[in-house]
Image (spheres, rainbow, N blue to C red):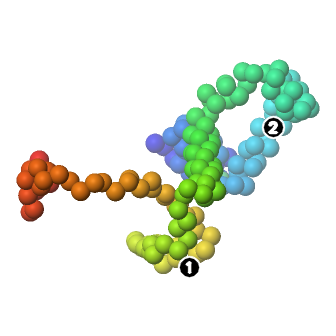
């Protein structure tokens, strides 16, 4: 994919594969300029958009039910990003529900240790704003002792998966 020059900062950048016509780099300052310019241009050229800025968002949505649908179709990258963030929020809510559910075990005193590996680990360990993901895995109830026959089928030392 071709590199191009940002029309605000003049730096070379790689356009997003979701935005093949991107003309502004990803720097926050350039993106802010882009949004401001877009807003100004739209205010001048698009009466519907102008109305939208004047009205309460809810009233406007009720009158323009297709707007966000079209916006999502035109901006798949934004949709994807929002979806990811929503997923994280859902996970967090699920975990909170679990924690409030008295049938969930309190793991605060568990002996689990967390190991960070890889080149960035030292930095991560010292950075207490590092994001953390916690996985809560539902334990299976302990199985009853296997009947005699299954021991004969899988004698000790045999390969569990002969296909491997
Ligand atoms: Zn730029």
Q: Mark 1 points at which residue?
A: 126
Q: Residues within 10 Å of mark 1 (few under 14, many from 20)?
A: few
1 or 86: nearer the viewer: 86
Residue drawn 40% across and 71% down? 118
- Residue 33's x, y, as percent? 76, 48
Vertically, is 44 above or below 134? above
Q: Residues within 10 Å of mark 2 (few under 14, many from 20)?
A: some
126 or 101: nearer the viewer: 101
Residue 113 seen by the camera: yes
Vertically, is 132 above or below 115? above
Q: What element carries label 1?
A: helix
Q: In this view, does 91 lie to the left or right of 157?
A: right
- Residue 95's x, y, as percent? 58, 54
Q: Ligand 1: does it lie within 8 Å of the C-beta at label 2? A: no
Q: Mark 2 points at which residue?
A: 39
Q: Is residue 119 left or right of residue 128?
A: left
Measure how far apart labels 1 and 2 are at the Cα level: 41 Å
Labelled disc at residue 142: none
Residue drawn 73% across and 25% down? 67
- Residue 13's x, y, as percent? 56, 51
Vertically, is 45 above or below 153? above
Q: In this view, does 164 lie to the left or right of 102?
A: left
- Residue 27's x, y, as percent? 66, 55
For marks 1 and 2 on the same chain, the one whose residue lies earlier in the sequence: 2
Vertically, is 34 above or below 100? above
**Residue 23, image quadrant:** top right
4 or 104: nearer the viewer: 104
Residue drawn 81% across and 34% down? 41
Front position among marks 1 and 2: 1
């Amino acid at each position: 994919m071709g590199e191009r020059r940002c029309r605000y900062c003049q730096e070379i950048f790689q356009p997003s594969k979701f935005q093949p016509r991107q003309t502004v780099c990803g720097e926050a300052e350039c993106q802010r300029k882009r949004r401001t310019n877009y807003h100004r241009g739209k205010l001048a050229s698009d009466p519907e958009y102008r109305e939208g800025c004047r009205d309460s968002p809810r009233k406007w949505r009720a009158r323009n039910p297709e707007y966000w649908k079209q916006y999502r179709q035109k901006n798949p990258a934004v949709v994807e990003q929002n979806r990811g963030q929503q997923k994280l929020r859902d996970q967090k809510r699920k975990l909170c529900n679990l924690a409030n559910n008295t049938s969930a075990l309190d793991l605060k005193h568990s002996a689990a240790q967390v190991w960070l590996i890889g080149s960035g680990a030292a930095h991560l360990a010292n950075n207490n704003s590092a994001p953390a993901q916690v996985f809560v895995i539902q334990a299976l109830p302990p199985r009853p002792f296997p009947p005699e026959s299954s021991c004969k089928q899988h004698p000790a030392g045999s390969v569990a998966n002969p296909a491997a």
